[in-house]
Amino acid sequence: MAFGELKQRQSVMWGNGPYQHITETVTDIHARVIERLAPQLGIRWLDLACGTGAVAELAARAGASVTGVDLAPALIETARQRAQEQKFEIDYRVGDCERLDLDDASYDRLSSTCGIMFAPDHAATAHELARVVVPGGRIALANWTPDGGLGQMFKMMRPFMPTPPPSAGDPFAWGREEVVRELLGDAFELDIEECVSTLNIPTGEEYWQLFSSSYGPTKTAAEALDEDRRNEFHQTWVDFFDTHYRSDGGVSHSRQYLLVVGVRR
Ligand SMILES: C[S@@+](CC[C@H](N)C(=O)[O-])C[C@H]1O[C@@H](n2cnc3c(N)ncnc32)[C@H](O)[C@@H]1O
């Protein structure tokens, strides 16, 4: 599979399902990124891989002048509707964080929550981050770690998903401090810490119902399988969470991520 085909597939996959239900499971991460970047009146803010606009809305509410970019047209459509309903003037665009149609040094703040890590060309994305942020401007990224709960979930899903091209970067590499320093250290003064976001849900079955209906990667993988394999995927998912993340109150999925904060040199 060529890179162009992968991008095309990803742009459909992420928009497959009401992603809004999923973004509501990471609102603690959104809040932390907002707190670190402290939006203020008139500040130029770019939210990359913005999904349905959760972080963009928080920044706009604080008075920032916000642009949101995402690869998935369906998610941008939802984000635009939400902005209209809430009377936010957010400039939403369909676009690729590896090749942004934005001017050099045009943003004071740049955020991406569990977002840019999914673009396959990591060096191209890092180049764009450095290019569009003004000297002295700040970035905050939340990137799932490979060994944390989300990394483990993707390992569990992998046998049921199509194999990406060998040249595509592993998204979870963005969750390794040494890789992030290699990618961004020349352009940004970095402060990196590991944090945890926990998703609590009564059962593995309810987790499956939520993700197989609303999370693009899980829903798309399930839809592409024949009935036997889909049942196997379903059972594997339920067993995985009921076994590894069972707690007194149900399933407690701890999801570690790197919080990467940087100042443009
Ligand atoms: C897990 S979602 C996170 C969405 C949002 N940031 C949030 O916190 O809810 C990952 C997002 O990355 C977007 N994405 C993936 N590859 C991208 C790319 N190359 N350029 C821009 N967005 C991309 C997807 O469309 C999807 O909306």
Image (cartoon, rainbow, N blue to C red):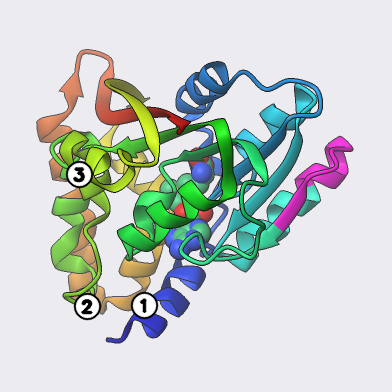
Q: Give whichever of 227, 191 is nearer the camera.
A: 191
Q: Give whichever of 117, 18 is nearer the camera.
A: 117
Q: Residue furthest top?
A: 248
Relative to 148, residue 106 above or below: below
Within 10 Å of disc 3 (Cα), the crowding (few <14, some 14-19, many 20+) is some
Name the residue type under label 1.
Answer: Leu
* Quadrant in the rendering for residue 217: bottom left
Q: Is mark 3 within 8 Å of ligand 1?
A: no
Q: Residue placed at 56% from the left, 42% from the top?
A: 133
Would residue 19 be visible to someone looking at this image? yes
Q: Which residue is mark 2?
A: 165
Q: Residue placed at 34% from the left, 80% from the top?
A: 3
Within 10 Å of disc 1 (Cα), the crowding (few <14, some 14-19, many 20+) is some
| Circles 1 and 2: CB atoms closer than 8 Å | yes
- Element under disc 2: loop
Q: What is the CA distance from the residue labelled 2 to the residue labelled 3?
A: 20 Å
Give the magenta range. Answer: 82-92
Q: Residue 205, how many percent across, how many down? A: 30, 42
Q: Residue 16, how many percent across, how many down? A: 51, 65
Q: Which residue is mark 3?
A: 179
Name the residue type under label 3.
Answer: Val
Relative to 221, residue 61 above or below: above
Q: Residue 85, how many percent across, how many down? A: 86, 42
| Circles 2 and 3: CB atoms closer than 8 Å | no
Q: Give whichever of 85, 101 is nearer the camera.
A: 101
Relative to 221, residue 4 above or below: below
| Circles 1 and 3: CB atoms closer than 8 Å | no
Quarter placement of the C terminus: top left
Q: Which residue is mark 1?
A: 6
